[in-house]
Image: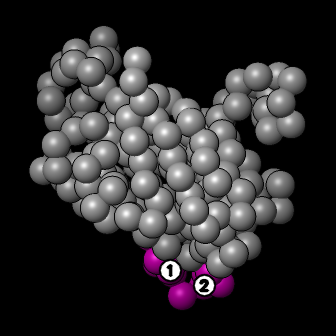
Amino acid sequence: MIIETEGYHFDFIDALNVFKFDETDKTKALYHGVTALKAVDLIAEFENFDVYIEIKDYFTYEEYKTPEKKSENEHFNWLKKYLKNKLRDSFIYRCMENKTEKPIYYLCLINFDNALNIRLAKSLKTELPVGKPSPRWKREFVKSCYVVNLEAWNRNFPKWPVKKLAK
């Protein structure tokens, strides 16, 4: 299944379905309407699991910074919270659609260097309930979380190649 979005070409060879989840076109079946909830960019559905994908392509450091933030750490924490909320809200959408029965993997494709992406992934994992954090829970919220750039994506997920589209 091939999809092009957010300036990237994805090929999910073994997916059952892949679609733009944060659909903004009101005429499309996957449009959620106007709500306070956020949505990940893509969802790839496989036989035994789903992959939620968020894409962030920052061309300059200034784009990464938000006007109300001042320090590097505040920018980092803002982005971590943003990514966490995207997953959580998308799960709520899918739960309301009765589509959360399979394990979920969360992949963030961000064009930062590997060191910053690893730091972001480690920090994000502490705030997401990865695995089954409570004995009362009957299932996992999210199986795993990765934050990778294009090179790391293709190295770690060679079965699902991604290319940057020419502008």
Tag 2 secondary structure: loop
Mark toward the viewer: 1 or 2: 1
Position of residue 11 relative to residue 128, above or below, is: above
Alpha-carbon neighbours of circle 2 within 10 Å: few (<14), some, or many (≥20)?
A: few
Q: Residue at x 56, y 36 (%)?
A: 4
Q: Which residue in the protein does label 1 denote? A: 132
Alpha-carbon neighbours of circle 1 within 10 Å: few (<14), some, or many (≥20)?
A: some
Tag 1 secondary structure: loop
Mark 1–mark 2 Cα distance, whole angstroms, equals: 9 Å
In front of the other: 15 or 25: 15
Q: Split into 4 quadrants, where in the image is the C terminus? A: top left
For the stretch drawn in magenta, what is the main secondary structure?
loop
The amino acid sitting under disc 1 is Lys
Where is residue 50 drawn, in percent x and y? Answer: 62, 65
Q: Which residue in the protein does label 2 denote? A: 136
Where is residue 29 drawn, in percent x and y? Answer: 86, 36
Q: Split into 4 quadrants, where in the image is the N terminus? A: bottom right
Position of residue 23 relative to residue 126, above or below, is: above
The amino acid sitting under disc 2 is Arg
Q: Is residue 128 visible?
A: no
Q: Is residue 145 visible?
A: yes
Where is residue 123 drawn, in percent x and y? Answer: 27, 55
Q: Is residue 118 magenta?
A: no
Q: Residue at x 17, y 35 (%)?
A: 73
Q: Residue at x 65, y 78 (%)?
A: 48
| Colour setting | one colour
| Region in magenta | 129-139
